[in-house]
Amino acid sequence: MTQFFDENGNAYAATMVRALPTVVTDVRSEERDGYTAVQLGYGSRKEKNINKAQKKAWGDMGSFAHLVEFRMDALPDGVEKGTTFDPFTIMNVGDTVHVTGTSKGKGFQGVVKRHNFAGGRRSHGQKHSEREPGSIGATGPGRVFKGTRMGGRMGSDRIRVKNLSVLAVDPETNTLLVKGAVPGRRGTLLEIVKEAVA
C-alpha cells in the first residue's frame, strides 16, 4: 500500500496492483460443457512443468501459471479462444472495480481476535480469564449448539471487496493504483472485475 495525492492535494490510501495481459484459453458453451464461461490464462511458467494435455489445449498461446474461469449468461461479442485482454485498454481512472482474493491466513486464533469477544473482567478476583470465551452452553439442553462462536482457524478465506476506485493507471510499469485495501498478502493473485455500467 501507498499514498496517492490527486491534483487537488487530497491524500488517499491506495494499493499498487500489478496487472498483466490475460489470454482466453478456452470458451465453455452450453452445448459442449453444460454452462457458459470464459477461461483466462495469466502469467507464465516453464514449459517442462506443463503436462501434455495442457500443451495441446493451449497450442501456441503460451504457458500460463494461473487459470481462472468466469461464468456468464451469454458470451460477449468477439470473445474467442486466443483473444488477449489488456487491462490498460479496459481500465480507466475513475472506474469502479470489485477485487476478489484470498485473505491472509492467521492460523488458530482465540475468540477475542476471531469474534471480537470482550473477554473476562480484570477485577473481582479473576486471574487467568482475561481472554477466555466464558460459558458455551445452557444447563437445560446439556449440549453445545451448532454454530457457537469459538476459537478456530482464521483467515485464508475468499474475500470480495466491492466498489473500489481506480486512482491511476501506468501501462509502462503494468500497475494499477486502487483506492483502499485489497485482500491478501504481497503476491496474492487477485480477480479485478470492472463494474458494469447500466
Image (spheres, rainbow, N blue to C red):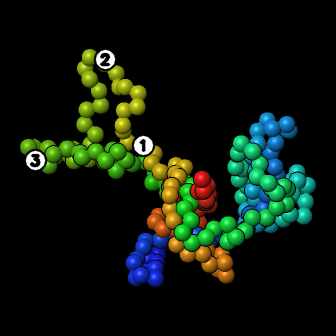
What is the secondary structure assignment of the residue under circle 1? strand
**Residue 64, percent from left and from top:** 77, 62
Q: Which mark is residue 141?
A: 2
What is the secondary structure assignment of the residue under circle 2? loop
Q: Which of labels 2 and 3 is toward the front?
A: 2
**Looking at the image, is mark 2 or mark 3 earlier in the sequence?**
3
Taking depth in this image into account, of 151 and 157 the one nearest to the observer is 157
For image coordinates 78% across by 62% down, the residue present is 23
Most extreme residue toward the top is 140
The residue where tag 1 is placed is 152
Q: Amino acid at mark 1?
A: Gly
**Residue 137, percent from left and from top:** 29, 27
**Residue 137 can be seen in this image:** yes
**Residue 198, percent from left and from top:** 60, 53
Q: Amino acid at mark 2?
A: Pro
CA distance separating discs 2 and 3:
31 Å
Most extreme residue toward the left is 124
For image coordinates 81% across by 38% down, the residue present is 30
* Label 1, residues with CA under 10 Å away: few <14, some 14-19, many ≥20: few
Taking depth in this image into account, of 39 and 188 the one nearest to the observer is 39
* Label 2, residues with CA under 10 Å away: few <14, some 14-19, many ≥20: few
CA distance separating discs 2 and 1:
24 Å
